[in-house]
Amino acid sequence: MVVTVTLSGQDCAAVHIGRHAEVAAGCVELAAEALGRQRTASCSVRLPGAGSEKSMNGRQWAEYLNTEADKMRSGGAGAEQWAEKLSALAEKVGDLQVAGDASPQQRQRLERDIRIARSYLQRARMILQGLKLFARLEGDPMPGAEVAWVISLTNAGNKATDPVGLVLGSEQQGAGEVKYEPLGPGESRKVRISMALPAGTPTGRQVSDTLIVSSQVGDRQLATMAHLQTFTSEAASVKLTADSASLRDTERTLKVEVQNLSSKAQRARVYLTVPAGWQLRPEEKVVEAGALQTGACEFTVIIPPDAEARAYPVRARLILQKGVGGERESEPVNVFYFGHPEFEKWDNLAVRATVTTDSNYKAYDPHPLNDGVTLPPAGTHWTDAAWASEDVPADHWIEIDLGKAQTIDRVVIVWPVDNGQLYVSRTFQVQVYDEAEAGWITVAQVDANPETFYTVLKILPTRARRWRIFQPSGGGPMQRPNIMWVAEVGQAYTRRKHQMARSNKDER
Ligand SMILES: [Ca+2]
């Protein structure tokens, strides 16, 4: 049978890479042709066996060669022809040279293609001779660890192979070599090469070696390369957790868990990175953990009482001192410090008002909205900690009836914290009820409200009895846009003192 295949040099590589190495023999032929004719070749390959002449695409070609290779390995008909064909190809590829008038770029590209062609041929010979290659990594590939590549080449066929050797070029440490001798049926040849991974190696880094298998065919040497690679993994991981996010306390407990991921016992010194001005007790701790075990310790942090109200990122860091070394950092954890909502300094009129809402979520009712408690102590039932509307795409509102008309220039909304997350409405309005017009008038509009513990709105002094915090449909927190979720609402007139002081001065 004569098969006509037209492929470019690149196609050969693509066919080879995408399929099994058996394709190599055909690719070598094509690559050899391609090199001689501007990288595009049309060649006829006479394959063992009978059949009609046909054209095949890359996939059909690969499948055909796989079938032939199977026959070859089982010692069936055509084995001799394949051996002859490969020897002929070895001659052809061995003789390939770059023409003298090639430009430096062309030369470089062609030389690379010749190397690839030789490598294909070598791999085809290995497979057809029943040579099998195994590589495995011994030890934990962790920073600071000693590991080793163990590579063996075995003749799984029923005849002696070409004289063959293994050379391992290690990026990390030296190289190993085995002499070029034929491998008899069932015989194996092994190379073991150890590597020390520096303690400072980042995890996830690729650790690689280049393995070269070469053999002698007549007076020519052919080589194929394999890339052995693994990735460094963590020797230990560290996890930091903070106590309840709803605490206002300046003293907090932080827990550090050290998980030993290696197969050796570990001892770690643990530190915390805290903001300037914070006290930390103790400064460091030592945690021990057996192979694949977890150890833990606790720290106490003291936040200065005059600290700004916000979330502070804190990290844990550990230095491994036993087994395999290295440093690890935890993900940052937010320690919330709430400080004191501004309206606690004022006469909060809302605590004496009647509050109603558009709807209530599950067991909620409006009472927590003006009970004066902005940060409920740990253990408070959720229905006493905050109020939430139904979680539906509709307008939501909180109405504050002050009982009689009062002048207000501040509105404060304290947002809830649930499971360490703030739920802050992004869009809402402050409205007053106009008795004469029998309608609501907007006195303040908030859009793109930032993530904050409480929103303080300074408005023009406005006199009204009925007030409303109005959230249009979908204006709720980012995580749940159809809910309105509030811990406390405060209202005050803060200019009174200032104005009185000025009027006294005017009288003098
Ligand atoms: Ca409350």
Image (cartoon, rainbow, N blue to C red):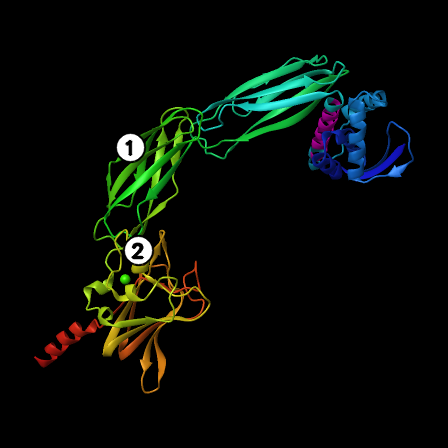
Q: Residue at x 66, y 19 (%)?
A: 153
Outermost residue, bottom direction? 436
Magenta: main secondary structure = helix
- Locate residue 230 relative to residue 181 in the image: left or right: left
Q: Quadrant of the N terminus?
A: top right
Q: Quadrant of the C terminus?
A: bottom left
Label annotation for residue 64: none
Q: Does 474 appear above or below 88?
A: below
User: Where's ligand 1: which quadrant?
Assistant: bottom left
According to the picture, the residue beneath numbered tag 1 turns out to be: 285
Residue 446 visible in rendering: no
According to the picture, the residue beneath numbered tag 2 turns out to be: 381
Provide residue 66's location: percent of width, then percent of height: 78, 31
- Which span is picked out in magenta? 109-125
Q: Residue at x 19, y 67 (%)?
A: 346
Residue 83 located within the stretch drawn in magenta: no
- Locate residue 158 relative to residue 375 in the image: left or right: right
Residue sitting nearer the eye, 108 or 390? 390
Q: Residue at x 35, y 79 (%)?
A: 441
User: Given the image, on which type of amino acid does mark 1 rest?
Assistant: Lys
Residue sitting nearer the eye, 207 or 157? 157
**Secondary element type, mark 2:** loop
- Locate residue 61 relative to residue 180 in the image: left or right: right
Which quadrant of the figure has residue 462? bottom left
User: Given the image, on which type of amino acid does mark 2 rest?
Assistant: His
Provide residue 240's location: percent of width, then percent of height: 35, 41
Residue 113 located within the stretch drawn in magenta: yes
Choose the circle earlier in sequence order: 2 or 1.
1
Provide residue 374's location: percent of width, then percent of height: 26, 60
Residue at mark 2 to residue at mark 1: CA–CA distance: 36 Å
Q: Does 412 appear above or below 25?
A: below
- Locate residue 229 relative to residue 456 in the image: left or right: right
